[in-house]
């Protein structure tokens, strides 16, 4: 693949219009989209970021990029006509009124006197955001993963809406893939799944995309005087909130800090990650996972955590690393309320769980993992669901998050707080389609942070299987495909 293949086209500026203005040729399920994606029709001033959203921007560095995404693998087209980038751009353009986060551009406040705003755009350069990327014909899944890892290690342009989409062609059997990445400040796992539901179809046949009920109403951007006035008022309010923070969290912090598991310092990756990433993916049978869950008791997530524990244990043994004491996994947990569905942004917290990597017996390892998850849930439920929002609100935003970056630098010698990240996101259990071509699988690709080790395993359920996306710091885990293979071995082991 040449360097030129990665360059975006810069000639297609699309003004957001209704599907009737765009013409035919796109498909969607109107009822599903209008009910599940209430992200259109914004009114009033532009949306202001939360303190948690802003920390995800401020903490970013060349070695810690904080965007999330997915590799969506497409089956060979039934008609023999592959998806082309023009059709994909046209399909996304017809849905931009349904997906507000893809229209938002970051607007900061001078000197960081207040939290930034998302500025709603009426013109999106889809020639930049949706790119045609070609691998040599007959390229394997490994080549696709290598390309994805390189693309995922590149930052998003903060002068534009914070997302990219790559249509990747050249795979074996005429398959294609769509790699997307969106900054974590815009979406978390749940809101990301909602965006996915708007982009893909649930039927292969063409259906009209529902227009906005009253036409698209973009959020109004505050003028400089408004921004200054709000910034002064918000600064005073946030200072008062910071003074009350010890009263809110003080009584629970001693027990919380005492009870939470501590990262295993003997495991690889107890240092800041480097800039390079490696990626692999695997798809496992959801029915088999459910059968194991029913035979052991517990949940599907308990089985997922056991599979990740077993795969990591085997990788450690392959590398002669000590695996006697438990590893600690950081598990993102959605705290999004029913009223917050469809509002984008971040509504999550972090649960820490010990993984019994030292247990040699797979059945007992499953039982220990189940018990560890119950203990982790008990600890998690004893803390406020908005703990991360409280904690990030305590960080001053002056000079655009300078305090956040200094805090991370000071904390670096004590890193990490966990040895890996494991996340499980529920997805649709029906087939999805991209311009009539059936989706074979959708493999999440998430973040690595210096606080959570060199490995991230994110799982999304889709149409009867569990799709695992495995992201690793190449310096620590260069052979990430081994972990993908060990996940299947771990499932076979428990099934026996």
Image (cartoon, grey):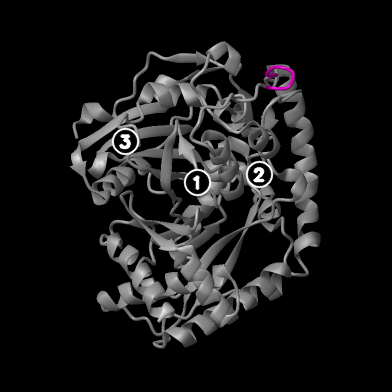
Mark 2 vs 1, N-terminal side: 2
Q: Residue at x 51, y 72 (%)?
A: 303
In this rendering, position of residue 150 left or right of residue 158: left
Q: Is residue 336 visible?
A: yes
**Secondary structure predominantly adopted by residues drawn in magenta:** loop
Measured in 3D between alpha carbons, the distance from the residue under mark 1 to the one under mark 3, in whole angstroms, is 20 Å
Q: Is residue 150 left or right of residue 163?
A: left
Looking at the figure, which quarter contains the N terminus?
Answer: top left
Magenta highlight range: 212-217
Q: Secondary structure at mark 3?
A: strand
- Ranked by sequence position, the earlier of labels 3 and 2 is 2
| In the image, residue 187 above or below residue 443 | above
Q: Which residue is mark 1?
A: 431
In this orientation, which residue lies closer to the viewer: 80 or 383? 80
* Secondary structure of the residue carrying numbered label 2: helix
Q: Earlier in the sequence, mark 1 or mark 3?
A: 3
Query: How crowded is the residue under tag 1: few (<14 C-alpha within 10 Å), some, or many (20+)?
Result: some
What label sits on residue 51 in the rendered view?
Answer: 2
Q: Is residue 204 above or below residue 275?
A: above
Q: Which residue is mark 3?
A: 168
Asked if disc 2 and disc 1 are in contact, CB closer than 8 Å, the reply is no
Query: Looking at the picture, how far across and down is residue 163, in whole percent?
Result: 47, 33
Label 1's element? loop
Name the residue rendered at 53%, 59% in the picture: 424
């Amino acid at each position: 693949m040449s360097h030129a293949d990665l360059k975006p086209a810069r000639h297609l500026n699309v003004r957001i219009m209704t599907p009737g203005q765009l013409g035919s040729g796109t498909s969607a399920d109107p009822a599903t989209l209008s009910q599940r994606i209430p992200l259109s029709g914004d009114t009033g001033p532009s949306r202001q970021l939360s303190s948690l959203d802003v920390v995800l921007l401020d903490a970013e560095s060349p070695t810690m990029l904080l965007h999330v995404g997915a590799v969506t693998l497409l089956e060979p087209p039934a008609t023999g006509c592959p998806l082309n980038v023009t059709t994909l751009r046209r399909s996304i353009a017809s849905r931009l009124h349904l997906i507000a986060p893809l229209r938002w551009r970051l607007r900061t406040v001078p000197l960081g006197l207040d939290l930034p705003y998302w500025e709603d755009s009426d013109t999106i350069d889809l020639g930049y955001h949706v790119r045609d990327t070609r691998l040599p014909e007959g390229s394997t899944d490994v080549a696709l993963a290598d390309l994805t890892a390189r693309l995922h290690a590149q930052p998003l342009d903060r002068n534009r809406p914070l997302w990219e989409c790559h249509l990747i062609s050249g795979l074996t059997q005429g398959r294609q893939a769509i790699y997307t990445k969106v900054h974590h400040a815009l979406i978390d796992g749940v809101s990301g799944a909602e965006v996915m539901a708007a982009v893909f179809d649930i039927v292969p046949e063409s259906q009209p995309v529902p227009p906005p009920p009253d036409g698209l109403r973009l959020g109004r951007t505050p003028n400089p005087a408004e921004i200054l006035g709000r910034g002064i008022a918000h600064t005073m309010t946030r200072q008062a909130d910071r003074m009350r923070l010890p009263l809110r969290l003080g009584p629970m912090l001693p027990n919380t800090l005492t009870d939470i598991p501590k990262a295993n310092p003997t495991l690889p990756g107890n240092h800041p990650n480097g800039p390079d990433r490696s990626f692999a993916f695997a798809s496992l049978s959801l029915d088999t996972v459910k059968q194991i869950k029913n035979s052991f008791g517990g949940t599907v997530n308990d089985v997922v955590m056991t599979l990740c524990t077993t795969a990591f244990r085997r990788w450690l043994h392959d590398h002669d690393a000590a695996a006697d004491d438990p590893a600690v996994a950081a598990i993102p947990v959605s705290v999004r309320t029913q009223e917050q569905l469809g509002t984008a942004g971040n509504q999550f917290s972090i649960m820490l769980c010990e993984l019994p990597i030292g247990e040699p017996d797979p059945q007992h390892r499953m039982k220990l993992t189940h018990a560890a998850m119950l203990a982790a849930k008990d600890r998690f439920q004893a803390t406020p669901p908005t703990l991360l929002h409280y904690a990030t609100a305590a960080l001053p935003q002056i000079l655009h998050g300078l305090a956040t970056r200094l805090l991370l630098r000071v904390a670096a010698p004590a890193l990490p707080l966990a040895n890996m990240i494991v996340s499980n996101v529920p997805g649709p259990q029906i087939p999805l389609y991209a311009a009539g071509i059936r989706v074979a699988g959708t493999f999440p690709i998430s973040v690595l942070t210096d606080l959570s080790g060199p490995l991230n395993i994110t799982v999304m359920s889709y149409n009867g299987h569990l799709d695992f996306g495995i992201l690793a710091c190449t310096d620590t885990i260069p052979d990430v495909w081994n972990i993908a293979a060990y996940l299947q071995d771990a499932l076979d082991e428990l099934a026996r």
